Amino acid sequence: MKVTSSPFRVSQQGVKPAPNSAAQSSALCDLENKNFIAGMRKNIEEFLKNSNDKILVFMLGLMYCYGLRVSEVLALDRSSMLGNYQLLVRGSKGSESRIVTVFYAKEVYDSLLLNTYPLGYVYSRFWLYRELKKYGLYGYFGTNMYASVTHLARHLKVLTLTEQDVPRGTISHFLGHKSIKSLSYYEKKGKSTKRG
């Protein structure tokens, strides 16, 4: 599948900037570019369904389905388990705690029973960055080459909920924000990446 009229191309590894494109010097991830968003959603969903890397599927599934931060995923441990594939996600960065249900790689959930340490003791955020980049499941925002390699799933969740006309207060609560004002960060990111 090829994305038309966009500086991005979709490959087996994901959506990446086209070689020598103008996008490499400006916005590498345009959250208002429907082709980019559709391509990235499709690639993430295909990866979640088809990958054999169960721990990465587990982590990305939580970030994509619930907009979890990397730090929230890495903090999961046996005490997070509530039964019936539900997890208590302890809010990070001053956010609210919330309960989520695991849909992908349920065997990883079962293995948390055996581990007394958080996932972050075994897997680092830098490992996660490398793995997501290896599979092409990333996007850069603005000119910052490091921002949102892993935050992309969270941005896509906000966009999905916004497109479904979910009220801002509900989105804010879903993401664990203590204040609805926190959503302005995502709105600014979408606008700041648009060039032209």
Image (tube, rainbow, N blue to C red):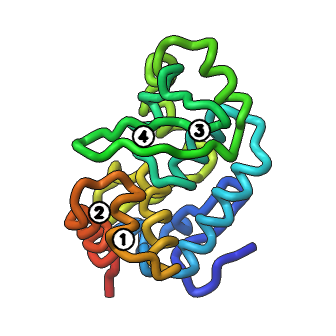
Numbered label attached to residue 143: 2
Q: Residue at x 76, y 51 (%)?
A: 49
Q: CA separation, marks 2 and 1?
A: 6 Å
Badge 4 or badge 1: first in the primary sequence: 1
Query: Is residue 28 or residue 161 the one in the foreground?
Result: 161
Q: Amino acid at mark 1?
A: Ala
Badge 1 or badge 3: first in the primary sequence: 1
Residue furthest to the front: 83
Q: Quadrant of the C terminus?
A: bottom left
Mark 1 surroundings: few (<14), some (14-19) or many (≥20) residues within 10 A: many
Residue picked out by circle 4: 70
Residue picked out by circle 1: 27
Q: Amino acid at mark 2?
A: Thr
Position of residue 103 relative to residue 116, above or below, is below
| In this rendering, the label closer to the viewer, 4 or 1 | 4
| In this rendering, the label closer to the viewer, 4 or 2 | 4
Q: Quadrant of residue 174?
A: bottom left
Instruction: State the image coordinates of residue 98 (x, y, percent, origin top left).
Output: 42, 45
Badge 4 or badge 3: first in the primary sequence: 4
Residue picked out by circle 3: 86
Badge 2 or badge 1: first in the primary sequence: 1
Q: Are marks 4 and 3 in contact (CB under 8 Å)?
A: no
Q: Residue at x 37, y 36 (%)?
A: 90
Q: Residue at x 54, y 65 (%)?
A: 19
Instruction: Determine if residue 188 is in view.
Output: yes
Q: Are marks 4 and 2 in contact (CB under 8 Å)?
A: no
Q: Secondary structure at mark 2?
A: loop
Instruction: State the image coordinates of residue 107 (x, y, percent, origin top left).
Output: 73, 29
Left-right relation of 48 to 15:
right
